[in-house]
Image: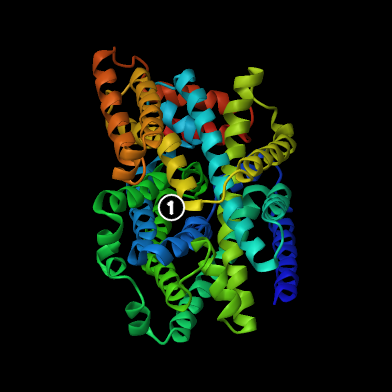
Amino acid sequence: MQMTFMLAFGLYLLGMIALSWFVSRKSQGGEDFLLGGRSLPLLLTLGTTVATMVGTGSSMGAVGFAYQNGWAGTLYGIGGAIGILLLAWWFAPVRKLRFMTMSEELSYYVGANPLIKNLIALVIFIASIGWLGAHIIGGGMYLSWLTGMDIQWAKVLIALSFAIYVVIGGYTAVVWTDSIQALILFSGFILMAVFALHQVGGWDAMLAAQPAGNLSWFAIDNIGLLPAISLSLAILVGILATPSFRQRIYSGSDVRSIRRSFTYSGVLYLMFSCIPAIIGMAAYAAVKDLDNPSFAFPHIALHFMPLGLGVLIIIAGISATLSSASSDAIAAVSVVLRDLYVLVTGKMPQAHKVVLLSRFALVLTISLALGFALTSNDIIAYITKMIAILMSGMCVCGLLGRFWPRYNWQGALATLVTGTATALYISLTPTLNSLFGNPVLPSLFGALTAGVLVSLLTPACQISREQALAILDAERQKMESPAPVLNSAAQES
């Protein structure tokens, strides 16, 4: 089984690399490499969005959580589905403004303030490294379990796997490989749930094996109401504030196709949310003494599935990790080239150097993420703490900026600082962290309160949104082409 898996994994990876080269061979400029030419059709946007959503957390993480907590395993999917639906209706219209990064968008809301743009760019880059780290952890644990490889070396191999095809093809490669991986992972997960139920004797037998608290609504009797809300809300916040999902908006062909693809993705993900829970509960019914609940998914694939199906399911799990990781990697690089490069050098990169610099930035970003991943093995804790600490403030910043014209750069600064400080305080206080489950609720409340109060106590922004957009467009034109298209789009906005 191990040799068969390694052969299948190698062939699968070679297929992704070949596909990356093929679909990106005609790409020419930086906008093609980082945003796919801003012309993704509905089906590709749908495929890459779904694949990015069904990542490490909703595969190994959610299955392992369900192994311990029953129907609480659905909370990850419910939070993600609500998040992508809100993103579709609240933020899809910003496609018309032709932003390149989320830091551009959030700074636009407060007069294109350079301090806010640079600060958010740093937060986004760190958050993207955090997301990448989570995917490397999950994929590494998965690979280690299946092959007996040392877990640290397994993490290195996972990082190299998605790094190769992303460096070759950029964003175009990411969306095409994501779409193929979405088909693989959906079919694999559904087949796994069906076979796992069959192996443990059916639905009633699976439920009979569970502790009573795990069978209550979302296992609230087991994990508590506040922790259940916090977990689902953490995932929702992650969707609203994750740069890779914003990049789907910036790269889509138009607002209508983006909104439709996000809506379809949300509905599919909501339907999918029960699948990891069923797999985790079936794993518990089959074997109750796993050393690490995160191994529930590969344990079922390795020991309860026919060989061919087991290999398909293993590849589906790897697909979940690689698709999300590649998306977060390219989103991080967009921030590096658009924002951090300017912060360090004082100028925009020249258009003919963007692709080469992007590839260097990809290698650096993935290397940093791997370094963080080598220090942790707890996926859900890693993700939820990282979201609360780095992304609660960005989520509130985006919502206030989008819907409250009085919001200013001082309020945005207060939002970001207070959100992070609150999350850190809760994380370092065991009693409060246990009460809430994770720091996201108090972090959101603190960020919102600080943002509103500071905005009201300081002068309103004197730069109109039209002026802010013109400032950002003028900066971006130096690394994009053709310039006339961008100018006309900015005027229409």
Q: Name the foreground residue: 55 vs 460.
A: 55
Residue 174 drawn at (x, y percent): 62, 53
- Relative height, residue 62 to residue 240 (above, below): below
Image-based side of 208 in relation to 255, left or right: left
Q: In terms of image quadrants, where is residue 354?
A: top right
- Quadrant of image for the C terminus: top left
Q: Looking at the rendering, in which quadrant would you find the N terminus?
A: bottom right
| Residue 402 picture location, percent across and down | 33, 34
Q: How is the image coloured?
A: rainbow
Question: Quick check: can you spot residue 100?
Answer: no
Residue 86 visible, this orientation: yes
Please give left or right for residue 8 compared with residue 206 in the image: right
Residue type, numbered disc 1: Ile
Number of marks in the image? 1
For label 1, the residue is: 258
Q: In the rendering, at what x and y percent does residue 43 appear?
A: 50, 62
Q: Is residue 395 above or below residue 122?
A: below
Q: Is residue 301 above or below residue 463?
A: below
| SS of the residue under disc 1 | helix
190 is higher (above) or lower (below) than 226: below
**Percent x, y of residue 330:** 61, 44
Q: Nearer the viewer, residue 28 or 262?
A: 262
Rendering quarter of residue 406? top left
Residue at 55% of width from left, 61% of height from top?
Answer: 320
Horizontal side of residue 179 vs 394, given as left or right: right
Neighbor class of circle 1 (other Cα within 10 Å; few <14, some 14-19, many 20+) is many
Q: Depth check: give the residue in front, 283 or 369.
A: 283
Residue drawn at (57%, 65%), measured in percent from left and top? Answer: 317
